[in-house]
Image (tube, helix red, strand yellow):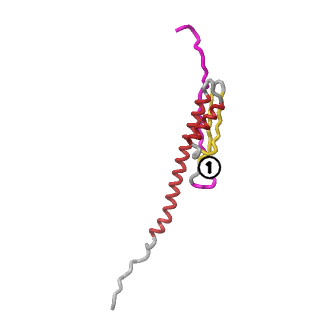
Amino acid sequence: MTAFPRRPPRGDRGAASTQLVLVVPALLLMALLVVQFALTWHARHIAQYAAQRALAAARTEDGTAADGRAQARRSLAALGSRVLTSPSVTVERTAAQTTARVNGVVIRVFPVPGLVLHASGTASGPTEKITTPTGGQP
């Protein structure tokens, strides 16, 4: 009688491929979400920087709200034209207070329907005016 070698059971055959098919898409999705939220964080910093630059230009004694808007647009063009899309710049200047706001939409890495992330930055400060000291000579 001839003895044939016994084959191992086939219960685990293909298990590694199945696990790979299930795990890799989940890991890729997590990596894309991390990148998306990192871009959102970066876009917020860009918006804040543009708002601060707009405030610095608009709050000077000879500055205007239009000067602030122009400076914010230059800053956005230099830094965030791809990351922060559809930016809107608002500068309000009164005799006492100047406020600059920059809002925009963050670029999407993963095309999820309905996922629209916004980034904004606000800067506010007193409007500068030159005053003369009152009182006597020092």
Q: Position of residue 94 (x, y in %)?
A: 66, 26
In the picture of the structure, the residue carrying the numbered disc 1 is 116
Location of residue 103 with respect to 16 vertically, above or below:
above
Front in this rendered view, residue 20 or 88:
88
* Amino acid type at image mark 1: Val
Q: Residue at x 63, y 42 (%)?
A: 87
Q: Is residue 117 above or below residue 73?
A: below
Query: Is the N terminus in the top left, top right, bottom left or bottom right quadrant?
Result: bottom left
Residue appearing at x 63%, y 27% in the figure: 63
Which element is circle 1 on?
loop
Asked which quadrant contains residue 54, the reply is top right
- What secondary structure prevails in the magenta region? loop
Residue 56 locus on image (x, y percent): 58, 30
Quadrant of res 73: top right
Q: Is residue 114 magenta?
A: yes
Q: Which residues are magenta?
A: 110-138
